[in-house]
Image: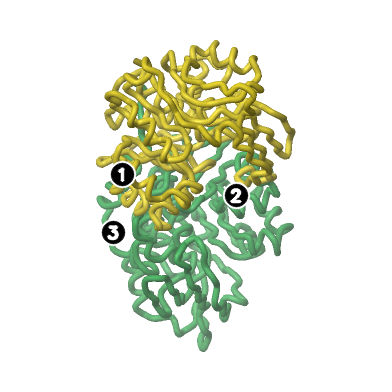
Chain colours: A green, B yellow
Amino acid sequence: MGILVVGSFALDSVQTPFDKIEDALGGSATYISLAASYFSGPIKVVGVIGDDFPKSYIEMLNNHNIDLEGLEIIPGGKTFRWSGKYHYDLNVRDTLLTELNVFEKFDPKIPENARKSKFVCLGNIDPVLQSKVLEQMENPQFIVCDTMNFWIEGKKAELLELLPKVNVLIINDSEARLLAKEPNLIKAAKKIRDLGPPILIIKKGEHGALLFTEDIIFSAPAFPMENIFDPTGAGDSFAGGFIGYLFKTRDLSPDNLKRAVIYGSTMASFCVEKFSTKGIEELSYLQIQDRFRQFMNLSRFDEE
Amino acid sequence: MGILVVGSFALDSVQTPFDKIEDALGGSATYISLAASYFSGPIKVVGVIGDDFPKSYIEMLNNHNIDLEGLEIIPGGKTFRWSGKYHYDLNVRDTLLTELNVFEKFDPKIPENARKSKFVCLGNIDPVLQSKVLEQMENPQFIVCDTMNFWIEGKKAELLELLPKVNVLIINDSEARLLAKEPNLIKAAKKIRDLGPPILIIKKGEHGALLFTEDIIFSAPAFPMENIFDPTGAGDSFAGGFIGYLFKTRDLSPDNLKRAVIYGSTMASFCVEKFSTKGIEELSYLQIQDRFRQFMNLSRFDEE
């Protein structure tokens, strides 16, 4: 029954201190499904594009065993466009342009054969739409949800209604502080888990990620990177690697959740090494496992 | 021959959002020697105080098997005083007052019996004084050095002269970026190790610490703390735990350096739980080992 991914498909124009690119493949559903595709296929996606969306991108996604039946193409429509500029400190970016285009009226319709998917990844879109996706599912068993400050501030009530329905919430540290109205991350995590999601992941960018469940707190290191080429999509690649590995292993034990966090971090680390989705387009599973082991060497220590 | 610790002795007045305290025990040498005392005694200290320094503090340090022969007492002098205020975000603090007093003319004189110490911890003082300490040592084998932005900006040349003589430099992330003039921490670490110290530790506060040697990068997690009571002295407690454990085990292998970083993090985590030095005054070695294991559970993951 596979994984269902719902989110945005975009054409991104990105400037970094090192280079720039125009109309590159972007969007949360794109990164999530690509990252997850290395673990388990086919990935079903639901999203919307205009007929200006390059065929080469469609082909690349198809080649990753990503099922695009749920990808609506609006004739004469223009694909969602985002443009941003990263500063020398790559943690800081300015959004130069957001053209919602066909995404403005996106109303996710889950194809018949995707409604039985057991694992669902709700990319960062309006929580109202995320809820609409869940309403169409027949018996989802594991729901991973992303969101952002824009929705926490603008659609708080709708988000709070969604949270008890998801198994995992993935957000970054500033979003966690905003959602919980609490500067201490450990306290914030408790408050957020009380809002519904039994599993919470807080991404901290260059400082790694924290996993919170009822029983454990797990601190995942960040991969030490000398050259971050383009941070766009890192969080979505994390979510894709995380849910992909869990679907592949069908094991939701704390120890396996930890591994899934590291596989998520692994995919994020590959993502930022190249522009757009290039960093996660041509990997082998061996490369992924090799980096997983590098994460292990990075953080492992033993008693005497 | 034990460990020699050189640094400041201070009377601190600290305000946090939770409470405040006046003329509490402070200073880098105080925290370093207390933290190290749990691993190996006696610790010899060199510093200076006025005759206003409370006897109860002297007694407490003596009770920790800290040898105060090298602690100069200036008759009629006033002890170094620091006063600071922490914000609701405890990462931000304002210095309200710095009265150098007897510390202004501090000229470290190492007692005869301390000159043979093999392990030396140079607390955060003027790099000129740190060098003067090393000149008096007979055959030091392992030198740990702390510094801060004030010296990186104000005594750069003197610091650069010192660095090739130390084995370990411990600084925080903003100091590392400042010293290397490089925003990427991994690149900054390479540049700093090229300045001399073969072992570099970069402390990242609530995000843990990074250890860099020729062969490894090790990422240590931060202890998840809901209540940080007073961050003063955390870095010095880290240094004390680090050098104390290494002296106790006499093992400078990469695996043991990792453990020492965790013991340093352990002592820092105890330090911030209470005001002033209270958090590291009454620990048992069992408590310390127990927290070491909690650090292990926090960051450990395995392959399938």
Horizontal side of B81 relative to A282 (left or right) equals: right
Camera-side residue: B113 or A6? B113
Q: Residue at x 27, y 47 (%)?
A: A290
Label 1: how many Cα within 10 Å (few below 14, some 14–19, many 20+):
some
Pointer 1 or 3: first along the chain: 3
**Could you tell me which chain the residue with mark 2 belongs to?**
A
Residue A244 visible, this angle: no
Q: Mark 2 to mark 3: distance in Å?
A: 30 Å
**Are discs 2 and 3 less than 8 Å apart at CB?**
no
Q: Mark 2 points at which residue?
A: A166
Q: Is label 3 in a helix, a strand or a loop?
A: loop
Q: Are marks 2 and 3 on the same chain?
A: yes
Whole-percent x and y of residue A119?
49, 52
Q: Is label 1 in a helix, a strand or a loop?
A: helix
Label 2: how many Cα within 10 Å (few below 14, some 14–19, many 20+):
many
Q: Which residue is drawn at 44% across and 74% down?
A: A14
Label 3: how many Cα within 10 Å (few below 14, some 14–19, many 20+):
some
Identify residue type, mark 2.
Answer: Val
Q: Which residue is drawn at 35% across and 26% down?
A: A302
Q: In which quarter of the image is the C terminus of chain B?
A: top left
Whole-percent x and y of residue A237?
43, 58
Q: Give above or below for A157 relative to A87.
A: above
Q: Is label 2 in a helix, a strand or a loop?
A: loop
**Could you tell me which chain the residue with mark 3 belongs to?**
A
Whole-percent x and y of residue B41?
43, 14
Identify residue type, mark 3.
Answer: Leu
> Which mark identifies residue A294?
1
Horizontal side of A226 relative to B84 (left or right) equals: left
